[in-house]
Image (cartoon, helix red, strand yellow):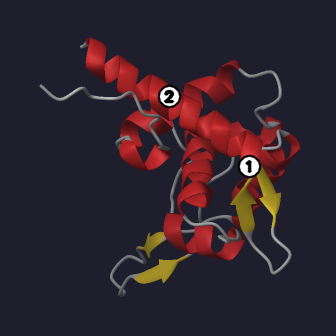
Amino acid sequence: MSVQEERGYLVRDVPAKKFIDAYAEHLKNSDKFELPIWSDIVKTGVFKELAPYGDDWYFIRAASIARRVYLRPGTGVGALQKWYGGNYRRGARTEHFRKASAGIIRSVLLQLEEMKVVETMPGGGRRVTRVGQQDLDRIAGTCVDDADEE
């Protein structure tokens, strides 16, 4: 018989969808993370026709950005713009790739910096702080615990 020892779970160990939903709920319940007043009218990119329908889209995007920065330290606004970009459909003409809105990404990163989840790197880009890493790993552990109960 082998004794399985308890170990901590990292963000990398949890499926992206589960972690993003759990962290978005955490941000929504947090007093430190606020929804901007413009969030109901802004589009997420030039290539979109309408603003997002869901009420929680900003928290979901923030959780997704936090996960991206966790997995790839040094990621900046430009790289995140490319990640969240998409095809700009121009009617009968050919499609072209367009980057996502930098303002949304920048506002999320600034709020995460105020919460001490991410910090600016000296060479450019962002990385997760020690406190932020503990917070994200704790939430990833709760995602695993929820899956074990089911």
- Residue at left 43%, top 50%? 12
Q: Quadrant of residue 46?
A: bottom right
Instruction: Residue at 58% x, 42% y: name it.
Output: 63
Q: Position of residue 3 (x, y in %)?
A: 24, 26
Of badges 2 and 1, nearer the viewer stands 2
Spot the residue most to the front: 1
In the rendered image, the residue lying farthest to the left is: 1
Q: Quadrant of the C terminus?
A: top left
Q: Secondary structure at mark 2?
A: helix
Task: Give the residue type that dot 2 points to.
Answer: Ala
Mark 1 — residue?
Answer: 108
Q: Give the quarter of the figure containing the N terminus.
A: top left
Does any portion of residue 54 appear in the rendered image? no
Q: Amino acid at mark 1?
A: Val
Residue 16 in picture, x, y percent from top left: 39, 45
Q: Which residue is mark 2?
A: 22
Residue nearest the viewer, comparing 88 with 3 = 3
- Mark 2 vs 1, N-terminal side: 2
Query: Which SS class for mark 1?
Result: helix
